[in-house]
Structure formats: structure tokens, C-alpha cells
Image (tube, grey):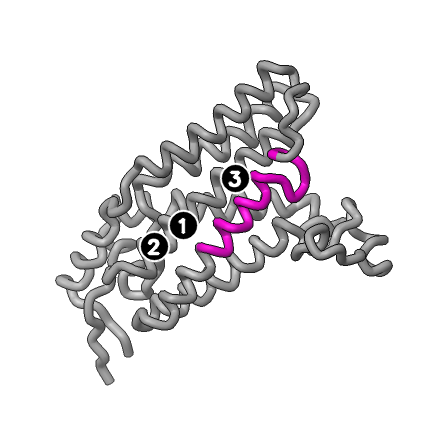
Amino acid sequence: MTTLNETQVEVRQKGDQPRYGIWLNCFITLLATNLLSIYVATNGTSDLGFVFQEDGLLESLSAVFYFSAAGIFAFGFKNKPAPLRFWCLFFAVLMFMVGGEEISWGQRIFGIATPASLDSVNVQNEFNIHNIDGIHQHVRMAGVAFVGIFCFLIPISNRFSRQMKQFYAQWGVPLFPSNTTWLVVLSILFMIVPRAINLPDLFVPDEIGEFLLSFAWIPFALNNSLENRLGRLEHNL
């Protein structure tokens, strides 16, 4: 049975301290908000189609960020001890799946036709799962719940509850870096505020929000895959 002593719990908590500079987060945010400002100021007439369109700049970069996070987590699976390595495997697979779904598995890049059986049930007639009728209507809510748990609930309870802190350390639950939480909040605001004020076109703010969120997983992957956060595990028979 794998257990962690008090010293190892402390080592894990030190690993939750911000390790990656906030400047890159700021750059990504500045890029996204400037693009939105240009789009709004020109009433959507500015020639930014290559940025916001399907498989445009933002969507492609989002996929690159997800694939990058998947690769970092795969490295963690190879090098980290259990149980963190199994979380790394879970997130590596998840990030790869989300990245693939983001660009419909390269459908437009490689000219792949949507199979008739999928085309008939996919609300966007694309080669992906998240736009299948019945899944499409709930995928955003499921995403919000997932983000809420891993980006807010776990870090907050880890900070304020000693029992939960020990539980997360024992089971190797990955902790979202506190210096990236604001980026997640901003990404959610890009998706919520336009709906709250009934904007007619939600595509552009959604794309920007998804772009910001996709980048936020990279420091999360770095903190949990490339840092020695758990210390040595004791194996008791």
C-alpha cells in the first residue's frame, strides 16, 4: 500500500507554488483581447476570418496547446511515480482527444469526408464526437464542470482543508497552478458574458475563450509532469 508521510505532504504543497512566469499568460491574454477589440471596433468587418474561422489561427493554436499538454503529460507518465503517473496518463489521453476534436481530427486539413452515418447525426456535419446530436447540447456544461473541479474546487480545498490536502497528496491528484487560475476565469467570462447580454454572435468570443483555456493546461501539465512534486513514496506491505 502506498502512503505519504507528513514531510512528503509538505513537499507536495511546495510544488504547488507558482513556478512558471506569469508573463506568457499575460501575452496570451493580451493577444486574445486585442483580437476581440479589433473585431468589435470594426463591427466584425475587419479581415480577420483567418483568425476566427474553423481551423483558423485561434482554433489551430488551441489544438497545438492541447497536443503540447498531452505530450508533457505523456512524459510525466513515463517518469513520475504512481499514483501521479496514472493521472498523467489520464490527462495525456484527455488532452490529445480534446486537441483532435478541436480540429475535427484534421478533417479539413487532410480533406477527409464525413462518413454518411456520422454526417446524419452531427450538427455541424463534421468528423468529430462532440458535435453529435445529444452530446453537442451537453458538452459545454460537462466541460465547465470538469474545469470547475480541477481548476477551482481541488486547489481551493487543498489550500484550506488539511484533510483534503493529505488526501490529494496520497492519491497523487494533480494540482492546478494558482498563478494560472485567472486565465481560466477570463476564458470562462469570454463564454458567459456574451450570453448574459444576449449577443447575437457567440462564435468569436467562444473561440477566444477556448483559446485562453487551451493554453492554461500547459502550465498545469508542466507543474505536474516536470516538477518533483510528490517526493519519494513509501511502500508499506
Q: Is residue 133 above or below residue 85?
A: above
Q: Horizontal and vertical percent for residue 100?
A: 60, 56
From the top left corner, tell me how far across and down residue 116 is, in percent.
86, 59
Q: 44 above or below 131?
A: above
Secondary element type, mark 2:
helix
- The magenta span reads 51-68
Q: Earlier in the sequence, mark 3 or mark 2?
A: 3
Task: Tell me if 107 is positioned left or right of 97 in this view.
Answer: right
Disc 2 target residue: 222
Judge whether residue 128 can be spotted in this image: no
Q: CA distance from mark 3 to mark 2?
A: 18 Å
* Alpha carbon distance from label 1 to label 3: 12 Å
Q: CA distance from mark 1 to mark 2?
A: 6 Å
> In percent of the image, x 48 and y 26: which residue is there?
33
Q: Nearer the viewer, residue 227 or 160?
A: 227
Residue 54 is one of the magenta-drawn residues: yes
Q: What residue do we see at 39% from left, 43% from top? A: 152
Q: Is residue 93 above or below residue 98?
A: below
Residue 144 screen position, x and y as percent: 53, 43
Counting other residues with Cα less than 10 Å from the Cα at mark 2, is it few (<14), some (14-19), or many (20 or more)? some
What SS does tag 3 mark?
Answer: helix
User: Quarter holding the N terminus?
Assistant: bottom left
Q: Decide: few, some or many residues near mark 1? Use Cα within 10 Å; few <14, some 14-19, many ≥20.
A: many
Give the numbered dot on residue 211.
3
Q: Residues within 10 Å of mark 3 (few under 14, many from 20)?
A: many
